[in-house]
C-alpha cells in the first residue's frame, strides 16, 4: 500500500476508510473487500507476514482466514451487513475474532452476535479499528466497526498513525501466546492460549460448526452467553484503558459534552457529533439554555449503566438516530435501548424523545430537537428530522395540489416532522423550469396516477430539473422506487456540458453515422420530401394560431419545382429559405392567381418560411438528387436536429462524421435556444417516409443501421441524456439494440392490431347476419304482419322483435353464440387500443428489460428513466432468474391475446365449437404457438456487463440459452484485460460463446460497432427469431483507456483489428448442422491469418493483441518506450513465431504513438506476451470452429459431394420422367377437351335457325 | 365617531332579517386548490357589459394568465387563460345563465406545472389614473361579490368628484357563503396591499373594512394588519344581519347616512369594493396575475365535503362538485350564490364564471315549495325591507299587473335582497314578482325609446 513504510508514527490527511485500509495492511494477515473497493495490499505486515487479499463482498474469506488462526478483517458496504448477518452468526458460533468494517453504514443494525463500535471521525475510525481487533482477540467474539456514511462525505481528515512499536505492543503478534483472559477460556485452552486461536488446525483435527439439536443448541447459547459475552464489557473497558495508556486518547462507550450542567441532552451517534456539539454551544451562548449532548460509540453491548448514570436527574433526552427504512414507526432501535436503560431510574427519570433523520443530522435539526424538548407539554415525543411531509408554500399550483391532497388524506401529518427552528426563506427567484420536450405531448395519462408521466413531472422531476430539490416532500409517490417510462426526457444536462453540435449541411452526405454513434438518441436525422415539409409547416402554423389555407392546392406543384430551384440555389445554399422561395416565385408566375389571391398566398408563404425558413437542410445524392432524377418532386431534404434535453456535448457525432458536417461549438444560451427551436420543429414535422427507409435498408452502401434510425419510431427507443456519463458506449449499443427491437416488433404489432380490427369487424358483421337471419324469411306473411302491426309509425327495434317473436315462424337465436361473439369483438377492440394507444398514449411496450444494477448511472438514476419499456433493475446474481420470471409473466399475458385471436378467427367463420375448442385453446402454451404467434410475445432483453459470464450467473444464463423462449441476453463487455489475470478476458468471452454454440439452440453474436452492418444483421436476426439469443458486445469503457473517450468508436475498431474482440456469429438454424457452417467470422479483417496485416500508405503494420492492451490504463506499466538501442527488437507478431530459444535474444515490441503522437517502438513485458499468446489461442479456436483453420477434410468433402451429385441426378431424372408423363397426359386431356368443345360448338351452330 | 367593541353593539342598519347562517359548514376550511381538469370553457361574457372579443385562434397554445379575449368597449373586461394549454374551440357553449353563449375552450397541458411566472406591470404608484383604469380593465377584474360589474368602471371616479370613504366589503351576509371570509383570513396582506393601491388613486379620508361580527378571526387579523399599514383604516364589525353586505345598507350602517333613492354610493362620496376584488387587484399589480381564478364556496347539506375552493375560471362545475366529494342524492336544488339571492342552476355542466361565489346544494329539508297564502297584512315585510319600501303593497300591485303603479311606489330601488319573501309568513313570492315587475318596466322603457 502506498506510503506503508514511511507513514508510521506520522499524522496524515486521510479518509476514514483509507486510514483503516492502511492499518489492515500493517497488522492483518489477510482481509477482503468488495471488488474495486480497495487496492490489494502489497508486501508484508509489521510482523513480517504477507497479507492475503480477496475481492469479495462477503465474510467467507475473512472467516476462513480467522478459523486458520490468522488476524483477519472484512470490508463490507453497510447495506450488506443485514445480508451477511447469518454468516456472521455462524462465525460467532465458531468464536472467531474477526473484524468487519462496515463502510457507509446509514441505518443501524443490531446483530447481537458481534460487538459493535461506531466512529464519528477519521481518527476515531482508525483507533476503533485497532481497539476492535484487540477486543475481538481477547473476547473471541467478532466485532463490527460501523463507519458512518456521512463520514465518507466529509473527505480526508488528519489521522495520527501509530509507530510500529506501539502497534506491536498493543496488539501483539497473532502467533504469540497470552494468558487466557477469562476463567472460561482458561478452562478451555489452559493457562495460556494463542492470541488468535488456530481453531482449524492440522495438528488437532476437529470439525467446526456442527449442527446441534434444539436442547444442545440452547445449551450452547446459554453457555456462550455466560462464558463469552458476559465478559465482553469488562474486556472492552480493559482494552480502552490500555489504549489510553499507550496513546493518550481516552475513549468511553458513551461520551458526554456539557452534560453535567445540562437539563436537556441530545444523544446521537456517528459523524454528526461535531454539528451536534456546535448546536449545543450556540444554544448555550445565545439562548442561555442548559443543554448538552451525548455520543454513543459502543452500540453492542449497549452501555446501559453508563448511560443511566449520565441521564439521572435530567429533564429530557432526545435520541436522534438514522431512519432505517421503517420511518413510519418513528421510534428506532436506539430509542428503545435508551428507554430500557432509563426505565430503571426512579424519580429522576428524564423524558425520552425520539427523532429519526435520513442522511446526516444537521446542526439546525439538532437545534430544533432541543427547542422541541424545552417546549414542555406541547413537545412532540416522536418526530422526523430534515424530512417534511408537507410545506406551507408550494412552488407551483400543481405542487400545491399535491401538498393539499396529502394534508387532506393525512390531516396533521406535517406535525410528524420537526421543522428546523430557522424557517426556510421562501426563494424569491426560482430558475424557470425547462419546458418539457414537445414529444412529451404524445404521452397520455389514462392509467393510475403512479404511471402518469405528467404527474411524475410536476410532482418530482421538475424539482430536479430546476434545482429545487429541497422543496420536495415525502409524498406517497416518493415511497415508490419507480419512475414512469421516458422520464429522462426531463433531464437537463445543460449545466454539465460545454459544447453543442452544430449541423453544417453544405458538406453533409446524409450518411447518418452521427445518429448511429450518439448514445443518447440526441441527434435525430430526418429525410423529408418537400411536400411533407410544407404540409408539416402548415400544421405547425395552425397550432400557432396562424392557419394557412391557401397553400394546400399549391404544395404538389411546389414540390415539382423544387428540383430546379435547388439547382438554381447552387452549392453554398444550406437552408430551406435558400431553396424553396425560388420555387414558390416561379409557381406564382405560372399560376397567375390574380392579385388578391397572390397576396394571400404570399402572406401565407411568409408564415411558412417563418417556421421552416431557417431549417438547415442538406441536398444529398441519396435523398434528393437521386430520387429527383427518377421522378420530379420525390426528392427529400436531409436534416439533423439536436435535442438539448438529451445532448451531453460529448462530440461523438462530430468525431464520427466523415465529412466534417458537424462542428462542436461552445454552449451559449442563444445556440441552446436555437437548437431547442429546431428540435421542437422536428418533433412536429412528419417522419421520414417508410418507403425511403425500406429502400435504404436494402442498400448496402447506405447501411441498414443508419436507415432504420431515420424513423423516429425506432430512433427514439431510449430517452434523455446521461448526467453522469457523456459518451456512454453501453448506452449507445443499447440504443441500437432497442431501436432494432422496435423495428422488428413494431411491424408485427401493427399487423396484429390490423388483424384484431378485421376480426372485430367480421364478428360484428357475423352478429348482424345472425340476427337478420332470425327474421322469419320463409313466411313473408309473418314478417309483413309483424311490420304491419306497427301501423306505419316508427317503432323501436326491440318492439318489432317482440312482435315477430309472437309469430310461429320466427327462429331461435343462439344467444350464447351471439354473446360470445359480441364479447370477443369487444375484447378485440380493447386489444387494438392497448396495442396502438393504450393508457400511456404510445401503445403497449414492445419488449421487456432486466438490467443489471450498479453499472450504468444513466440506466438507474432516479428520477430519470431512459427506458420506454418496463425495466427491472437487479443485481447480477438475480438477473437470469428475474428475466425468466418476467418473461413467463409476459408470456401469460400474450397468450391471453393469442387465445383471443384464435377464438375470434374461428368464430368469425362460425367454426367455433365450444365443446372442442374451449379446452384446446385454454391449454394453449408456448409449445402450441406457431412462429408468427411466437413473434407476438414480447421478447425479454437481459442487459448486463461481463460479470454475467462469471460464476453462478453463467449457469443461470446457460439455462436461459437452452430454453425455448425469446430471451435476448446483451452482455456489454468492456473488453479490458486484467494484468493480474491476463488470460481471463478472452477466455470468459469465448467460453460463453462455445457453451452457447454447443447448446445449438441460441443465436450467438459477438462484435462491436466497428462492423456496423454485421452488428445490424446480428442483432436483427437474433432479436427477430423467437428463440434465445446471446449478444456479446464490446462496450468500451473509455475512462479505462488512455485515449480520449470521444474516440471510443476507433477503440472498437482497434479491438477488432487486434483480435481483442473479434466478430463472431453462430446461427443454430443451418441446414446440415455442421458447426463450421453455423459459425461465421465475417467482418473480421483477414480471417485466414493469425494477425491482421494492415496495408497503410507508407508501410504495413501487423496488429496484435498487444496493441489493444497498449490503450488500456491498467497495462501502461507493461510498455516501455525504446528510445535508443533498437538492436534486437522484433515486432510482436514476428516474435511470437519464434521458438523458445530464439526468443531469448529478441525483445518484442509494438509500434504505437507516444504521448506526443510520434510513432515509436515500445518494448512489452512478459505478461503482455502471455496475454497476446492467449488471445491468439482464442482466435485460433474461433477459426477452428468456423472451419477456417482446418479446412473440411478434402476426401470427405469429395465423397459427400459425389453422393449428393448422384442423388441429385437421380432425383432430377425421376422428376423429369414424371413431369414428361404428366405433360403428355395433360396434352391428351386438353386435346380431347378442345375437340369436344369444337364439336359442340359446330353442332349448336348447325342447329341454330337463321333469322 | 364610532364606538366599536369586540362584543358589540355592532353597527347596523334598520330593518333586515336574520336567517340561519350555516357558515360553520365551511368557514374553518382553508382554501383548497381545485385540481386542474382536462378542458376549460371560458364564456366571453362573464361580466356586466359587452362580451370580450377573442384574440386567439383555434389550436393556438396559450400560457396561464395570457390574454385570450380583449375588452370590446368601456363596460367590458379582458379574459385570460386559466391554464397553460391549447385553444381547442371557439364557439357556442352552455353558460351558467342557461343559454348557449360564445366561449373559448382551452385544453390544459398535462405537463405544465401551471406555474405562473410573476411579471408585474409598472407599479401603480408610477402610473396616472387613466393607465391604472386601463390596466384594471385589461386584468379582467370584476366585482367578485356576485354581480360581476367591471371593477375599472367602478374605480373611474368622474372628474370633480371626491371619494371621502373607501369601504372594503367583507360582510358576506348571505348564509352558507364563506369565500370572502377565507379570503380575508388567508389573503390579509394582499387585501391591505390592494386597498393601498386603490387609496393611492382615490385618496379617501378614511377607509373602512366592513366585516360581519361572525368572523372574529378575520376582524382580528385585519385589525393587526391595518394598524401596521399606516393608512387610515378602520375595521368595522357589523351586526350579523341580512342584507348587511348590500352597498347601501353597509353605508347606512357605518356612516349612519342613507344613500338617497336613485343615487349611487358615489353620490355620497363612498366607494365600496368587495374584498376579493381588492385582493385580485393586488395580485395583478404585484405579480401580473390577472383574474384567472377565484374562491368558490361549495357547500350545503347535500355536498359531501363542503369546502372553499380556489377554482380556475372555466372549470366545469361538475368537476368542482366532484372535488368536494360530489353532490349527494338528497340534493333537491342547486343554487349559484347564496340561498337569499342565488339563482337556481339546472345543470352542473357549465363552467364556473367570474361572478360565482358559491355552489350551494340544498336538500329537501331546506327546499320546500311553500304554498302561497293570502296576505294577512301582518307587516313583517315592511319591517324586513332594508329600503323601507312597502313590499306588501308592491306585491298586490304585481298580482294585478300594475307595473306603472309599482314604479311609482319606488320599485326600481329594490335590489332584490329577498328579505320580504323570507319574512312573509304566508309564503308569498314577493321578490320574485318584483323581478318580473322590474323586467316589465325595463322592457317598456326600451320600447318607448325605440
Image (tube, grey):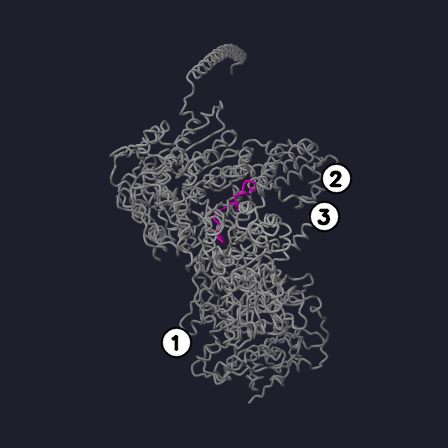
Image mark for residue A215: 3
Crowd class of label 2 (few under 14; some 14 to 19; many from 20; radius 10 Å): few
Q: Are marks 1 and 2 on the same chain?
A: no
Seen in the picture, residue A161 relative to A424 is either above or below; the reply is above
The number of numbered badges drawn on the structure is: 3
> Residue A808 versus residue A719: which sits nearer the camera?
A719
The answer to whether residue B85 shows anywhere in this view is no
Q: CA distance from mark 1 to mark 2?
A: 87 Å
Q: CA distance from mark 2 to mark 3?
A: 85 Å
Q: Residue at x 67, y 46 (%)?
A: A796
Tell whether A243 sits left or right of A1086. Answer: right
Crowd class of label 3 (few under 14; some 14 to 19; many from 20; radius 10 Å): few
Query: Start and end of the magenta stretch?
Result: A861-882
Q: Are marks 2 and 3 on the same chain?
A: yes
Q: Name the residue furthest front.
A: A191
Crowd class of label 1 (few under 14; some 14 to 19; many from 20; radius 10 Å): few
Residue A491 located within the stretch drawn in magenta:
no
Give the percent coordinates (x, y) of residue A196: 55, 50
The answer to whether residue A1182 shows anywhere in this view is yes
> Residue A693 versus residue A449: which sits nearer the camera?
A449
Residue picked out by circle 1: B126
Closer to the camera: disc 2 or disc 3? 3
Residue picked out by circle 2: A806
> Residue A145 versus residue A942: which sits nearer the camera?
A145
Give the percent coordinates (x, y) of residue A463: 48, 59
Give the percent coordinates (x, y) of residue A418: 56, 67
Amino acid at each position: 500500500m502506498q506510503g506503508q513504510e514511511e507513514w508510521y508514527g506520522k499524522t496524515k490527511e486521510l479518509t476514514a476508510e483509507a486510514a483503516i485500509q492502511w492499518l489492515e495492511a500493517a497488522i492483518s494477515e489477510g482481509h477482503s473487500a468488495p471488488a474495486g473497493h480497495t487496492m490489494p495490499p502489497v508486501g508484508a505486515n509489521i510482523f513480517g507476514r504477507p497479507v492475503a487479499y480477496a475481492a469479495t463482498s462477503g465474510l467467507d474469506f475473512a472467516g476462513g482466514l480467522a478459523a486458520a488462526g490468522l488476524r483477519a478483517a472484512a470490508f463490507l458496504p453497510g447495506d450488506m451487513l443485514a445480508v451477511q448477518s447469518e454468516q456472521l452468526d455462524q462465525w460467532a458460533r465458531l468464536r472467531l475474532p474477526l473484524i468487519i468494517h462496515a463502510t457507509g453504514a446509514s441505518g443501524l443494525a443490531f446483530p447481537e452476535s458481534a460487538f459493535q463500535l461506531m466512529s464519528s471521525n477519521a481518527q476515531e475510525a482508525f483507533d476503533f479499528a485497532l481497539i476492535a481487533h484487540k477486543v475481538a482477540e481477547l473476547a473471541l467474539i467478532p466485532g463490527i466497526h460501523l463507519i458512518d456514511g456521512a463520514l465518507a462525505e466529509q473527505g480526508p481528515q488528519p489521522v495520527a498513525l501509530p509507530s510500529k512499536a506501539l502497534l506491536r505492543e498493543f496488539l501483539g503478534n497473532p502467533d504469540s501466546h497470552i494468558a487466557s483472559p477469562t476463567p472460561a477460556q482458561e478452562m478451555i485452552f489452559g493457562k495460556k492460549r494463542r492470541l488468535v486461536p488456530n481453531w482449524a488446525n492440522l495438528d488437532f483435527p476437529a470439525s467446526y460448526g456442527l449442527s446441534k439439536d434444539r436442547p444442545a443448541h440452547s445449551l450452547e447459547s446459554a453457555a456462550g452467553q455466560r462464558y463469552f459475552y458476559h465478559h465482553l464489557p469488562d474486556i472492552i473497558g480493559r482494552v480502552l484503558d490500555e489504549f489510553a495508556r499507550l496513546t493518550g486518547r481516552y475513549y468511553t462507550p458513551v461520551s458526554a459534552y456539557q452534560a453535567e450542567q445540562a437539563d436537556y441532552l441530545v444523544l446521537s451517534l456517528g459523524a454528526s457529533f461535531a454539528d451536534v456539539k456546535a448546536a449545543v454551544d450556540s444554544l448555550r451562548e445565545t439562548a442561555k439554555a442548559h443543554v448538552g449532548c451525548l455520543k454513543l460509540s459502543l452500540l453492542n453491548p449497549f452501555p446501559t449503566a453508563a448511560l443511566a448514570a449520565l441521564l439521572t436527574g435530567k429533564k429530557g433526552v432526545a435520541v436522534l438516530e438514522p431512519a432505517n427504512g421503517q420511518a413510519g414507526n418513528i421510534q428506532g432501535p436506539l430509542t428503545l435501548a435508551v428507554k430500557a436503560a432509563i426505565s430503571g431510574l426512579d424519580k429522576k427519570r428524564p423524558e425520552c424523545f425520539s427523532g429519526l433523520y435520513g442522511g446526516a443530522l444537521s446542526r439546525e435539526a439538532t437545534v430544533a430537537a432541543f427547542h422541541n424538548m424545552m417546549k414542555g407539554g406541547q413537545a412532540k415525543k416522536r418526530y422526523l428530522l430534515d424530512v417534511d411531509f408537507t410545506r406551507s408554500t408550494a412552488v407551483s399550483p400543481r405542487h400545491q395540489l399535491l401538498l393539499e391532497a396529502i394534508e387532506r388524506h393525512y390531516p396533521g401529518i406535517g406535525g410528524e416532522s420537526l421543522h428546523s427552528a430557522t424557517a426556510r426563506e421562501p426563494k424569491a427567484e426560482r430558475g424557470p423550469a425547462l419546458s418539457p420536450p414537445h414529444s412529451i405531448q404524445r404521452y397520455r395519462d389514462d392509467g393510475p396516477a403512479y404511471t402518469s408521466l405528467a404527474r411524475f413531472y410536476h410532482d418530482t422531476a421538475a424539482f430536479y430539473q430546476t434545482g429545487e430539490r429541497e422543496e420536495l416532500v415525502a409524498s406517497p409517490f416518493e415511497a415508490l422506487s419507480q419512475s414512469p417510462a421516458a422520464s429522462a426526457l426531463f433531464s437537463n444536462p445543460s449545466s454539465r456540458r460545454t459544447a453543442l453540435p452544430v449541423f453544417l449541411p453544405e458538406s453533409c452526405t446524409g450518411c447518418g453515422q452521427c445518429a448511429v454513434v450518439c448514445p443518447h438518441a440526441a441527434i435525430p436525422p430526418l429525410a423529408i420530401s418537400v411536400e411533407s415539409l410544407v404540409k408539416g409547416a402548415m400544421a405547425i402554423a395552425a397550432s400557432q394560431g396562424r392557419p394557412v389555407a391557401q397553400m394546400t392546392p399549391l404544395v404538389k406543384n411546389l414540390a415539382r419545382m423544387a428540383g430546379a430551384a435547388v439547382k438554381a440555389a447552387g452549392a453554398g445554399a444550406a437552408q430551406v429559405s435558400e431553396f424553396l422561395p425560388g420555387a414558390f416565385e416561379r409557381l406564382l408566375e405560372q399560376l397567375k392567381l390574380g392579385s388578391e389571391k397572390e397576396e394571400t398566398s404570399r402572406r401565407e408563404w411568409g408564415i411558412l418560411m417563418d417556421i421552416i425558413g431557417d431549417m438547415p437542410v442538406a441536398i444529398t445524392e441519396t435523398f434528393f438528387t437521386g430520387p429527383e432524377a427518377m421522378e420530379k418532386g420525390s426528392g427529400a431534404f436531409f436534416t439533423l436536429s439536436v435535442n438539448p434535453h438529451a445532448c451531453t456535448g460529448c462530440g461523438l457525432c462530430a468525431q464520427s462524421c466523415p465529412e466534417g458536417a458537424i462542428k462542436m461549438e461552445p454552449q451559449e444560451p442563444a445556440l441552446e435556444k436555437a437548437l431547442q427551436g429546431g428540435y421542437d420543429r422536428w418533433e412536429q414535422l412528419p417522419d421520414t417516409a417508410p418507403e425511403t427507409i425500406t429502400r435504404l435498408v436494402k442498400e448496402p452502401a447506405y447501411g441498414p443501421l443508419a436507415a432504420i434510425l431515420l424513423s423516429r419510431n425506432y430512433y427514439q427507443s431510449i430517452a434523455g441524456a446521461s448526467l453522469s456519463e457523456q459518451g456512454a458506449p453501453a448506452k449507445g449499443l443499447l440504443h441500437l439494440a432497442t431501436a432494432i427491437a422496435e423495428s422488428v416488433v413494431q411491424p408485427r404489432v401493427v399487423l396484429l392490431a390490423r388483424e384484431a380490427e378485421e376480426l372485430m369487424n367480421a364478428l360484428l358483421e357475423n352478429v348482424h347476419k345472425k340476427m337478420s337471419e332470425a327474421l322469419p324469411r320463409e313466411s313473408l306473411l309473418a314478417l309483413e304482419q309483424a311490420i304491419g302491426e306497427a301501423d306505419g309509425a316508427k317503432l323501436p327495434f326491440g318492439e318489432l322483435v317482440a312482435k315477430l317473436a309472437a309469430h310461429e315462424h320466427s327462429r331461435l337465436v343462439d344467444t350464447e353464440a351471439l354473446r360470445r361473439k359480441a364479447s370477443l369483438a369487444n375484447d378485440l377492440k380493447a386489444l387494438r387500443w392497448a396495442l396502438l394507444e393504450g393508457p400511456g398514449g404510445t401503445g403497449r411496450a414492445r419488449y421487456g428489460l432486466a438490467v443489471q444494477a450498479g453499472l450504468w448511472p444513466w440506466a438507474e438514476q432516479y428520477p430519470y428513466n431512459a427506458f420506454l419499456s418496463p425495466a427491472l433493475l437487479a443485481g447480477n446474481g438475480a438477473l437470469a432468474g428475474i428475466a425468466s420470471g418476467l418473461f413467463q409473466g409476459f408470456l401469460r399475458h400474450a397468450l391471453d391475446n393469442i387465445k383471443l385471436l384464435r377464438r375470434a378467427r374461428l368464430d368469425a367463420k362460425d367454426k367455433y365449437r365450444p365443446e372442442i375448442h374451449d379446452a384446446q385453446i385454454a391449454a394453449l402454451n408456448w409449445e402450441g404457438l406457431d412462429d408468427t404467434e411466437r413473434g407476438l410475445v414480447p421478447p425479454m432483453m437481459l442487459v448486463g456487463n461481463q460479470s454475467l459470464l462469471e460464476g453462478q450467473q453463467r449457469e443461470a444464463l446457460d439455462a436461459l440459452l437452452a430454453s425455448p423462449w425469446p430471451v435476448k441476453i446483451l452482455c456489454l463487455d468492456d473488453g479490458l484485460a486484467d494484468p493480474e489475470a491476463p488470460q481471463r478476458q478472452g477466455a470468459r468471452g469465448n467460453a460463453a460463446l462455445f457453451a452457447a454454440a454447443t447448446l445449438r439452440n441460441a443465436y450467438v453474436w459477438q462484435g462491436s460497432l466497428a462492423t456496423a452492418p454485421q452488428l445490424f444483421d446480428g442483432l436483427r436476426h437474433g432479436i427477430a427469431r423467437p428463440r434465445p439469443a446471446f449478444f456479446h458486445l464490446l462496450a468500451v469503457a473509455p475512462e479505462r483507456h488512455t485515449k480520449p473517450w470521444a474516440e471510443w468508436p476507433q477503440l472498437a475498431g482497434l479491438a477488432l483489428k487486434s483480435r481483442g474482440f473479434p466478430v463472431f456469429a453462430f446461427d443454430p438454424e443451418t441446414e446440415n448442422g455442421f458447426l463450421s457452417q453455423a459459425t461465421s467470422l465475417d467482418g473480421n479483417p483477414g480471417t485466414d491469418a493469425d494477425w491482421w496485416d494492415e496495408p497503410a500508405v507508407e508501410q504495413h503494420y501487423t496488429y496484435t493483441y498487444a496493441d489493444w492492451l497498449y490503450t488500456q490504463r491498467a497495462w501502461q506499466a507493461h510498455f516501455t518506450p525504446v528510445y535508443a538501442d533498437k538492436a534486437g527488437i522484433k515486432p510482436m507478431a514476428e516474435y511470437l513465431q519464434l521458438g523458445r530459444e530464439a526468443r531469448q535474444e529478441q525483445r518484442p515490441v509494438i509500434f504505437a504513438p507516444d504521448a506526443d503522437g510520434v510513432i515509436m517502438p515500445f518494448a512489452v513485458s512478459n505478461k503482455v506476451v502471455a496475454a497476446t499468446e492467449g488471445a491468439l489461442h482464442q482466435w485460433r479456436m474461433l477459426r477452428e470452429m468456423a472451419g477456417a483453420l482446418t479446412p473440411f477434410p478434402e476426401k470427405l468433402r469429395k465423397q459427400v459431394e459425389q453422393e449428393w451429385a448422384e442423388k441429385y441426378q437421380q432425383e432430377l431424372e425421376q422428376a423429369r420422367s414424371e413431369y414428361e408423363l404428366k405433360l403428355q397426359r395433360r396434352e391428351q386431356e386438353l386435346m380431347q377437351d378442345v375437340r369436344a368443345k369444337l364439336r359442340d360448338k359446330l353442332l349448336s351452330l348447325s342447329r341454330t335457325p337463321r333469322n | 365617531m364610532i364606538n366599536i367593541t369586540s362584543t358589540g353593539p355592532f353597527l347596523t342598519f334598520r330593518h333586515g332579517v336574520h336567517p340561519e347562517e350555516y357558515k360553520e359548514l365551511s368557514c374553518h376550511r382553508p382554501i383548497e386548490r381545485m385540481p386542474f381538469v382536462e378542458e376549460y370553457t371560458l364564456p366571453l361574457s362573464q361580466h356586466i357589459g359587452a362580451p370580450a372579443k377573442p384574440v386567439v385562434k383555434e389550436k393556438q397554445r396559450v400560457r396561464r394568465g395570457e390574454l385570450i379575449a380583449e375588452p370590446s368597449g368601456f363596460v367590458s373586461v379582458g379574459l385570460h387563460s386559466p391554464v397553460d394549454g391549447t385553444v381547442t374551440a371557439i364557439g357556442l357553449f352552455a353558460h351558467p345563465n342557461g343559454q348557449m353563449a360564445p366561449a373559448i375552450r382551452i385544453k390544459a397541458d398535462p405537463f405544465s406545472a401551471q406555474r405562473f411566472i410573476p411579471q408585474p406591470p409598472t407599479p401603480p404608484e408610477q402610473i396616472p389614473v387613466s393607465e391604472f383604469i386601463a390596466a384594471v380593465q385589461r386584468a379582467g377584474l370584476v366585482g367578485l361579490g356576485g354581480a360581476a360589474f367591471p371593477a375599472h368602471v367602478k374605480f373611474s371616479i368622474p372628474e370633480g368628484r371626491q371619494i371621502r370613504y373607501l369601504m372594503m366589503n367583507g360582510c358576506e351576509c348571505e348564509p352558507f357563503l364563506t369565500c370572502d371570509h377565507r379570503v380575508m383570513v388567508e389573503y390579509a396582506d394582499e387585501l391591505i396591499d390592494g386597498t393601498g393601491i386603490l387609496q393611492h388613486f382615490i385618496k379617501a379620508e378614511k377607509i373602512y373594512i366592513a366585516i360581519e361580527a361572525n368572523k372574529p378571526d378575520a376582524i382580528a387579523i385585519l385589525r393587526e394588519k391595518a394598524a401596521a399599514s399606516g393608512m387610515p383604516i378602520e375595521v368595522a364589525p357589523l351586526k350579523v344581519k341580512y342584507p348587511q353586505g348590500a352597498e347601501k345598507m353597509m353605508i347606512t350602517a357605518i356612516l349612519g347616512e342613507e344613500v338617497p333613492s336613485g343615487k349611487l354610493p358615489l353620490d355620497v362620496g363612498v366607494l365600496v369594493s368587495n374584498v376579493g376584488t381588492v385582493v385580485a387587484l393586488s395580485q395583478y399589480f404585484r405579480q401580473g396575475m390577472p383574474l384567472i381564478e377565484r374562491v368558490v364556496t361549495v357547500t350545503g347539506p347535500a355536498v359531501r365535503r363542503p369546502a372553499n375552493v380556489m377554482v380556475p375560471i372555466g372549470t366545469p362545475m361538475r368537476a368542482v362538485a366532484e372535488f368536494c366529494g360530489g353532490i349527494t342524492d338528497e340534493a333537491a336544488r342547486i343554487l349559484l350564490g347564496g340561498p337569499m339571492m342565488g339563482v337556481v342552476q339546472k345543470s352542473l355542466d357549465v363552467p364556473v364564471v367570474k361572478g360565482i361565489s358559491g355552489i350551494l346544494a340544498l336538500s329537501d329539508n331546506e327546499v320546500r315549495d311553500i304554498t302561497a297564502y293570502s296576505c294577512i297584512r301582518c307587516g313583517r315585510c315592511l319591517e324586513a325591507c332594508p329600503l323601507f319600501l312597502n313590499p306588501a303593497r308592491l306585491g298586490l300591485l304585481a298580482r294585478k299587473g300594475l307595473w306603472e303603479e309599482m314604479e311609482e311606489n319606488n320599485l326600481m330601488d329594490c335590489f332584490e335582497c329577498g328579505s320580504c319573501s323570507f319574512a312573509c309568513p304566508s309564503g308569498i313570492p314577493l321578490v320574485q314578482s318584483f323581478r318580473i315587475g322590474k323586467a316589465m318596466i325595463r322592457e317598456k322603457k326600451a320600447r318607448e325609446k325605440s
